[in-house]
Image (cartoon, rainbow, N blue to C red):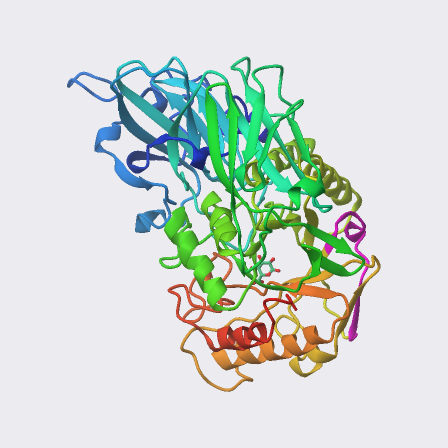
Amino acid sequence: MDQLLTPTESSHTVLLSNVPLRSTRSLDGSWRAILDPYDTGYVNILGQRNRQGFFRDFKPRSPADRVEYDFDRSLQLRVPGDWNTQDPTLLYYEGTVWYRRLFDVTEIGAGRSFLHFGAANHTARVFLDGEELGCHVGGFGPFAVEVTGRLAVGTHSLVVQVNNRREPTRVPAMRSDWWNFGGITRSVELVTVPEVFLSDAWLTMAPDGRIVGGATVDKGTGQGRPADRAEAGPPVTVELPDASIRVRLVDGRLEIDAVTAATLERWRPGKPVLHRVRWTCGDDALEDEVGFRTVRVDGNRLLVNDEETFLRGISIHGEGPSGGRRAHGPQDADTLLSWAQELGANFVRLAHYQHDEHMVREADRRGLLAWAELPVYWGIAFDDPQVLANALDQADELIVRDRSRASVILWSVANETLPGESRLAFLGALIDRVRSLDQTRLTTAALLTVPSNDPTVHIEDPLGELIDVVAINQYLGWYYGQRGEVPKTVFSTAFGKPIVFSELGAGAKFGNHGSEHEIWTEEFQAAVYEAQIAMIRAQPDCVGLSPWILKDFRTPLRVLPEIQDGYNRKGLVSEEGQRKLAFEVLASFYAEFDWDQNR
Ligand code: GCB
């Protein structure tokens, strides 16, 4: 029965980039919501589309009306936001929630209109005035539906069916070490654009110092995802006044040679310089702030602006700085990234899925390098072509949204996936897609290391062949290995590529003090960091680290009473932002680095 969306059903949605640069009308705020754990709101018991389904937004208007729902008398939920933390009875809820927002249109404007969603976890079906306009699969990427011609003067009903049930054929799949926050978790906006407009426009610096970019002109001729090619239409012009550059794009593609680009002051970690970029196409104009830097690897070295760079990082989940809720908006981005900078970090791993756009834009402004990641995490159905199709869609959403961001230097395609043929083929296809969308950044994947008593760890996972930077998750001194032995461990790979320790760490409950041999104490966690830092200092191929993790975060996997209570306690700060001892240990290591030398 067609109750839930499968990946192939993702349809009639479009991908628009640069939404924050456009004038939009916010539909955030209080929405009405109906819980529908048995999915009765869409189809009836005969398996047919329910003519009185919740998407019709009916209500009993007279005593004889046979309508068994009423949004006006139902729950209220804030958008953006997860539903789990807005009502105690919804904390563990996984299933369908119907959201409804009424909005008034007072005049019919010119041009075209789209309803844009920053993200909804995991599937979303969008209905306007009872009509289904599109559905989207994937909990962290942006999507839009076109509503041109549908917004007559009057009141309109926007209904969204959101479902966050875990399924083996979803990405992520059945189990993850974070909370499966459901809901319309990022902002909803009504975006108005000219008839012919730039559905995508991006600009960045290639490893050789050329400026490259592209634009897609949407002439209203069809639906679908933007290609990197403009159809014949009005010319697209891009201006960079700081370098006196004004160019017309040919075939939607742009290349400015390195000599011309050399006049632009570079964006550097810790010293971000952003330049005004202006796009025009017919009546459409967009103004962005873009940084230009190069990133490349040379053997086992990582070079940013051709300077050897050590990534002094920290991993971050998309969870707000307090309240154990899904993060959203500029305030959360500002707080989380300010904590990272107080730690002395120059790099953030935005784990384990696409974060709110405010995070990468704020990272640009703060001069933080960033790793952006796809939710290809434990237990993915690698041999299912529909699952791959959905992962590829999620890659499009991640890269098309963020490829003008100087902060983003790494696209990570997977975290802790088990070697095997179908996995390699799946991730190979994903890496190809990433490179077809962006050849200017590096690819990576966080590999799982298997515990052993051997002080030398040699990584031979064939995925290492396909990626540019080998990322290693290792929990020496915590899940395995004696702490005293950690500094003696040497990591090497079969690939002659740089290594980043994408995870390391230990759990501690804030305020729990005791011996450094007593698990869950701040002292124990700090001692693991000391041992890891000693190990890292001696690693020949290591170009950085992003320990696990900035802040304690909610997860149903962590059940130890009075210690975990539903939180992963590996944070350097508690779920309310209180610093543990390990914060200072890592901060003093990072303070040794010379910002000007990057080392
Ligand atoms: C990992 C996972 C991460 C977990 C972490 C842990 O390897 O990548 O999602 O939260 O370990 O705490 O065990």
Q: Which residues are magenta?
A: 454-469
In the figure, 93 relative to 128: above or below? below
Residue 537, by quadrant, is: bottom right
Residue 595 at x, y = what percent?
58, 67
Q: Is residue 464 magenta?
A: yes
Q: How many marks?
A: 0
Name the residue: 75% across, 61% down: 301
Q: Kindly identify the residue that appears in the image at 76 percent across and 66 percent down.
A: 541
Q: Residue furthest bottom?
A: 515
Task: Name the foreground residue: 534 vs 71.
Answer: 534
The quadrant in which the C terminus is found is bottom right
298 sits left or right of 166 in the view: right
Q: Is residue 500 inside the magenta stretch?
A: no
Q: Is residue 16 in sight in this rendering? A: no
Q: What residue appears at the point 32 percent right and 30 percent down from the top-left corner?
A: 100
Residue 223 placement (x, y as % from top left)? 54, 18
Q: As drawn, is 477 to the left or to the right of 520?
A: right
Horizontal arrangement in the rendering, residue 120 relative to residue 492 (left or right): left
Q: Residue furthest left?
A: 63
- Ligand 1 shows up in the quarter that is bottom right
Instruction: Say which of 247 and 150 sits in front.
Output: 247
